Amino acid sequence: MTGLVVAVFALTYLGMAAGRVPGLKVDRVGIALIAAVVLVVGGAVAPPKALAAIDFPTLFVLFGLMILSAQFAAAGFYDWCSLRLAGSAASPGRLLALTVAVGGGLSAVLANDVVVFAMTPLLCVGLERRGLDPRPYVIALAGAANAGSAATLIGNPQNILIGQTGGLDFWSFAAVCGPPAVVALAVTYGVVAWTWRGRLHLDGPVRPPAVAVQPLDR
């Protein structure tokens, strides 16, 4: 039985790393579900224990946050943030810092993956129109989303699960995890700024693709 658990664990992580199963239309969610089914059917985990392992309060909180984040996207809030960032009069270095701050701040209170997915397209177009290379800014946005989401209980699913299991309140968690998250944001900015120093501008003129903009619904 231990061999089955180890094999399923290893194959699941390989599938998660690859993102899919070669030859099959199975993504990471499908891989995780298949692994759970194999463990239950194989007798490694009894059905009652498998059901007890599901933390429904955490899932409900996460579901609510996903709905809230989706509504922000539907209202054009992320598009508005992206356009404001890319269109600001800040220098390239300060714009990089603003990208880290905005990405980290939004990810602390909203679903961080939605923040990155929703902001990236328009941010890239706006940066290219300014003659800036979007790659360091997108890398900074992704890093900031991860760092910022660690600051609060609702920043990511792991934090929600930790808070629910440990009976932690929002402000106590933020008081402990907020400062390291701020340090991580500063490190994110520093690493990206140093790595791309002197290379924030594009080498030649570009013609950004047209992207549909969702108007901000106030």
Image: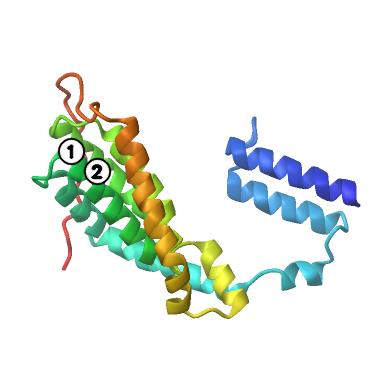
Dot 2 alpha-carbon crowd within 10 angstroms: few under 14, some 14 to 19, many 20 or more = many
Q: Is mark 2 on a helix, strand or loop?
A: helix
Residue 116, position in %: x, y? 36, 49
Question: Identity of the amino acid at label 1?
Answer: Pro
**Distance between mark 1 and mark 2 Cα atoms:** 6 Å
**Toward the viewer: 212 or 138?**
138
Most distant residue in the top direction: 204
Q: What element carries label 1?
A: helix
- The disc at residue 96 is 2
Residue 199, position in %: x, y? 25, 26
Q: Which quadrant holds the C terminus? A: bottom left
**Rendered position, 153 above or below 210:** below
Question: Which residue is rendered at x = 48% and y = 68% of the image?
Answer: 63
Give the quadrant of residue 111: bottom left
Question: Identity of the amino acid at label 2?
Answer: Leu
Residue 191, position in %: x, y? 37, 39
- 143 horizontally vs 157: left or right: left
Say if mark 1 contacts mark 2, CB within 8 Å.
Answer: yes
- The disc at residue 92 is 1
Dot 1 alpha-carbon crowd within 10 angstroms: few under 14, some 14 to 19, many 20 or more = many
**Toward the viewer: 122 or 166?**
166
Question: Which residue is rendered at x = 71% and y = 50% of the image?
Answer: 34
- 66 horizontally vs 216: left or right: right
- 82 horizontally vs 183: left or right: left
Question: Which residue is rendered at x = 28% and y = 54% of the image?
Answer: 101
Residue 165, position in %: x, y? 62, 75
